Image: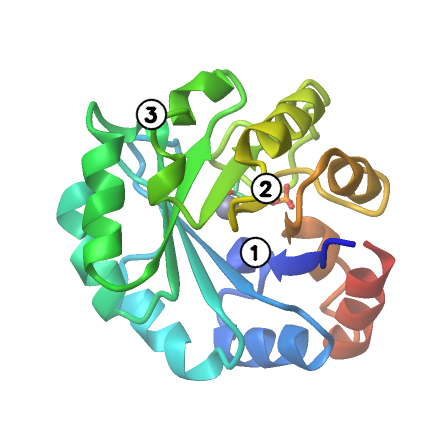
C-alpha cells in the first residue's frame, strides 16, 4: 500500500502568523508544508517571493514543497532553492522549455516537480518523467484556495499512475481536496494530497486542535 502524505497549503493560513501556523500543522501530523507562489501573471493572484520562503524555512521541520505558479520561471529557480525549498515544482505551461526548467531545478540539488493545469493533456509530461520526482495534477485552475474540485482530473491521475509504472515518482493533487475528494484521488493513485481550506478552516478558535481534526479527517 502506498503511503499517503498530507501537504497543507499555507495559502489558507493566517498571513500574520506563519511560524505558529507551520508549527501547529506539523505538530498535528502534516507530512509536508506546501507553499503556493503566485506572480499575478501566470495566475491572477500574488503571494510569496524568495524572502518570504526564506522566512518560513526555519519553522519547517518536515519538507518544504514550493509550487511555483510563475512565468517565466527559470530565472527564479535558484532564488527559491537558496531560500530553502526541498522540492520545486514548475508548471509545464509556464514556458516553451519545461525540460530545461526541470534540468535547472535538478542542477540546484533539489527535488523536481512538474505541474499540469486541468486543461493540459497528460501527454505533455511524456518526455519529462525521467527528470521528475513528482507530477502535480491540478484539480482546480490555479490562483485561489477554496475552489471546487474538478472531477475530470481523476481519470488523468489514474492514467498518470499507469504511465509512471515502477518509477519512484510522486503524484500530487492540489485543489478542492477535502474528506470527500481525498479518497477518490488516493484510489486513482495520488499519494501527496495538498489541502488548504480543508486544513485551516475554523482555525481562529483553537487552531492546533482544529487543524489536527481537519488533517485526520482527510
Ligand atoms: C491553487 C493552489 C492550491 C490551493 C489549494 O492555486 O495551488 O494549493 O491553495 O487550496 P484548497 O485546498 O482550498 O483548494
Ligand atoms: Zn499549490
Nearest to the eye among marks 3 and 1: give it. 3
Q: Is residue 176 above or below residue 117?
A: below
Tell me which numbered mark, 3 or 2, is placed earlier along the sequence.
3
Q: Quadrant of ligand 1?
A: top right
Q: Is mark 1 within 8 Å of ligand 1?
A: yes
Image quadrant where one finds the C terminus: bottom right
- Mark 3 crowdedness (10 Å alpha carbons): few <14, some 14-19, many ≥20: some
Residue in view at x 35 percent, y 29 percent: 92
Q: Is the distance from the Cβ of mark 2 to the nearest ligand 2 atom less than 8 Å?
A: yes
Q: Quadrant of residue 26?
A: bottom right
SS for callout 2: strand
Distance from the alpha carbon under mark 3 to that under mark 2: 16 Å
Secondary structure type for disc 1:
loop
Which residue is rendered at x = 50% and y = 73% of the image?
18
Foreground: disc 1 or disc 2: 2
Q: Earlier in the sequence, mark 1 or mark 2?
A: 1
**Residue found at the very far left of the displayed protein:** 75
Distance in Å between CA atoms under marks 3 and 1 = 21 Å
Given residues 155 and 162, the one toward you in this image is 162
How far from the left and from the top, in percent, is residue 7?
61, 59
Q: Which residue is mark 2?
A: 174
Disc 1 designates what residue?
A: 9
The alpha-carbon separation of the residues under discs 1 and 2 comes to 9 Å
Q: Quadrant of the N terminus?
A: bottom right
Where residue 13 sits: x, y (%)?
Answer: 58, 62
Say which residue label 3 marks.
93
> Of residues 172 and 30, which is closer to you in this image?
172
Amino acid at each position: 500500500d502506498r503511503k499517503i502524505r498530507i501537504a497543507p497549503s499555507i495559502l489558507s493560513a493566517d498571513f500574520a502568523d506563519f511560524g505558529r501556523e507551520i508549527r501547529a500543522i506539523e505538530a498535528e501530523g502534516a507530512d509536508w508544508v506546501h507553499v503556493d507562489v503566485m506572480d499575478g501573471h501566470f495566475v491572477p493572484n500574488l503571494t510569496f517571493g524568495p524572502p518570504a520562503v526564506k522566512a518560513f524555512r526555519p519553522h519547517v521541520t518536515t519538507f518544504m514543497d514550493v509550487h511555483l505558479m510563475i512565468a517565466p520561471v527559470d530565472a527564479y529557480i535558484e532564488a527559491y532553492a537558496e531560500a530553502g525549498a526541498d522540492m520545486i515544482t514548475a508548471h509545464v505551461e509556464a514556458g516553451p522549455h519545461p525540460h530545461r526548467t526541470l534540468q535547472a531545478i535538478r542542477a540546484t540539488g533539489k527535488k523536481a516537480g512538474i505541474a499540469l493545469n486541468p486543461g493540459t493533456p497528460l501527454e505533455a509530461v511524456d518526455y519529462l518523467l525521467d527528470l521528475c520526482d513528482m507530477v502535480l495534477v491540478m484539480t482546480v485552475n490555479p490562483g485561489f484556495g477554496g475552489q471546487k474540485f474538478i472531477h475530470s482530473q481523476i481519470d488523468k491521475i489514474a492514467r498518470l499512475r499507469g504511465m509512471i509504472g515502477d518509477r519512484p515518482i510522486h503524484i500530487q493533487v492540489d485543489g478542492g481536496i477535502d474528506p470527500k475528494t481525498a479518497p477518490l484521488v488516493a484510489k486513482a493513485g495520488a499519494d501527496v494530497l495538498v489541502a488548504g481550506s480543508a486544513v485551516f478552516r475554523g482555525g481562529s478558535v483553537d487552531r492546533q486542535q482544529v487543524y489536527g481534526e481537519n488533517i485526520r479527517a482527510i
